[in-house]
Image (cartoon, coloured by chain):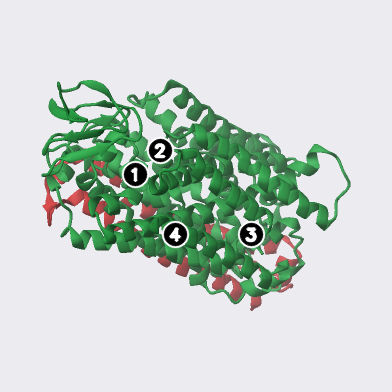
Chain colours: A red, B green
Amino acid sequence: MSSDGDRTPPSLLSPRQELADSTAHGEVYLRRLRHAQLQLSLLALVAFGAVFGVLPLALYLLPGLDHVHLVGIPLTIWIMLVPLSPLFIAIGWLYARRADALDAAFRDLVQR
Amino acid sequence: MIALAAIGAVTVGTLGLGAWGVRFVRTTSDLLVASRSVTAWWNAAAISGEYLSAASFLGIAGLELQLGASALWQSLGFTAGYLALLLFVAAPLRRFGSYTIPDFAEARLRSPRLRPLASAIVLLIGGFYLLPQLKGAGLALQVVTGAPYWVGVAIVAVIVAVNVAIGGMRGITYVQAFQFWIKVFAISVPACVLLIHFGGLPGRAALFGEQLPRAPAHGLTVNLPGRQAVQFPTAATFTIGGRRVTVAAGARRTLPGGVPIHLPAGTAVPVAMGTIAQTGARWSRPVGGTHQSSPLLVYSLLVATFLGTMGLPHILVRFYTNPDGHAARRTTVRVLSLLGLFYAFPAVYGALGRSLTPQLYMTGQTDTVVLTLPRLAWPGTVGTLLGALTAAGAFAAFLSTSSGLLVSLAGTISHDVWPRLRREPPSGMSVRRWRFRVAALCAMVIPALLALLAQSIDISILVGWAFAIAASTFCPLFLLGVWWTRLSARGAAAGMVTGAGIATVAIFTGLALGDAQTSTVGALLAQPALVSVPAAFLVMIGVSLRDPASADVAAEMLALHAPEGLGLRLADDELDSGFTSELLT
């Protein structure tokens, strides 16, 4: 994603002017940002799906987990109640950091 | 009486705070200036406050009591929906600067003709979402005062409609944030106190073992509010008004109302028709315990909640109190943590209720467990006080969510639908304000009437439908509109009609067939998102691809994706946000 920065199209106008005028080059800059952001979002979605999306099927296929009790409560209930919210927050937090960084890199490129 | 006083205090407090706040933020520009000083935490609390509805406060615990641990998927889905919103739409939509979904549809696709369709879907989703709020209000007042169900529906409908119409309680950030903390307080404190009082979860065999919910050691005496058809899961001998009755396992009886029915200790309680008696081991299975927690149904529900949250009309408008796209992301991450905090508690009521208030299986009013559990399980002052607290929290939930919804509905009617009915020249501000008021009153009538009919349907099921329709219409519109340049107006319209059509037809077919959820088809009729969402996406993409590559969308993409601070974007004050922006004041 960041390696794209080395291949900026040569031009006489400043990147910011190109964007403001919606020239072909300006559109390329913006498309790169959009694709980088989408890739990041899809990556986060895959991370989320790999855990949460698979969970119902995993619990369905492994009924034995119900018989494992922890402090008198089935392990499955613990799994449903405890680790998932922190997981969502962690994915969201990491994603927001990276997405802001992509925006900042774009801002640097344009304001150069 | 204490509970009634608490409800009254919350209602008056909410209305008063709303009226007081409105005096300070009068105009749109005030709002925009004010919004820049609102921190991400305040915004996040306000979004969560508007979001946590009757379904979260009462519905999840009720569904858990009735069906079992599979109800927890719902709270997880309600939270995860904000992750989808964060990943795909929070920052771009904030940057795009449309206040409402019809605004977005029209501006992104440059098609005024999409506006009436988007408005119609807003009304459909809003109506479906308003219905369970009113149902919750009816139940809550019935439980607290013994008034008939319709009284609570009517009272909350009138309070909210009049209040929105006279201009109070428009989504003021601080009021909504305050509502959030009331709800967290009202659900967490009784849950913790009850857990401490009972030393953890009592009656584990009925929760996780091989037992059915049963009468406690001193027996169980129930006065049913009316005649109730029930089924006995095991053979039982009990008394109705002192007269001994013996029934065989699986027997169906209609029990009389108003007569004390006494079940001796250890008798498995009969369950209202439509409820299934389950052993603890089945009850506590999150997936596959019964057909109502089949993996297919769980996945369909998760799709609906994960993708539907972004399409709720009253939530989107809240994102404009974020000053920019970066702040929208920060706010959404905080929403995830606030919702995670809240949703730790409803599950406690479902589990305690199964052991301590098994009579709710007899009445079938499982949705009231959050309200009745403290009083029934712990007779005396403390239980009454805790019950008053949950009742007040529930009312905070009805008021805040239905006000937010009604503002969206009335705004859509007065701004988009009404001017279209009679072709008129653009009208002045006073006419538009007057229209908004009439629309607010009218928009409440149909959901209120439907709520009277929908008394027997679980709150969670009703809300699930609103999410299913949102996921099958506005979710594809946003995802493709934000990230795909080829989306055409025709494609968007075709996809939304397909999604809304499949979801609505499925829901009403399922209703007409009754309790036919035993099969795969039945599961998908009850929660159609697993079918309707992919169908909407496919139609939207397919029709768009057949259209010629759309005209230049560079300006729209710039508005959606270019970060702020480059001098490329119009400032908010320069955007023509129109009447809809007033709704936020």
Image position of B191 with respect to B442: above or below: below
N-terminal of the two: label 2 or label 3?
2
Image position of B260 with respect to B23: above or below: above
In 3D space, how far apart are the residues under numbered discs 2 and 3 (Cα atoms)? 39 Å
What percent of the width, then of the height, locates residue B177? 50, 66
N-terminal of the two: label 2 or label 4?
4
The amino acid marked with disc number 3 is Leu
SS of the residue at dot 2? loop
N-terminal of the two: label 4 or label 1?
4
- Asked whether disc 2 touches disc 1, contact meaning CB atoms under 8 Å apart, the reply is yes
The amino acid marked with disc number 1 is Gly
Residue B458: assigned label:
2
The amino acid marked with disc number 2 is Asp
Indicate left or right for B156 with B390 as reference.
right
Residue named by callout 1? B62
Q: Nearer the viewer, residue B99 or B56?
A: B56
The chain under label 1 reads: B
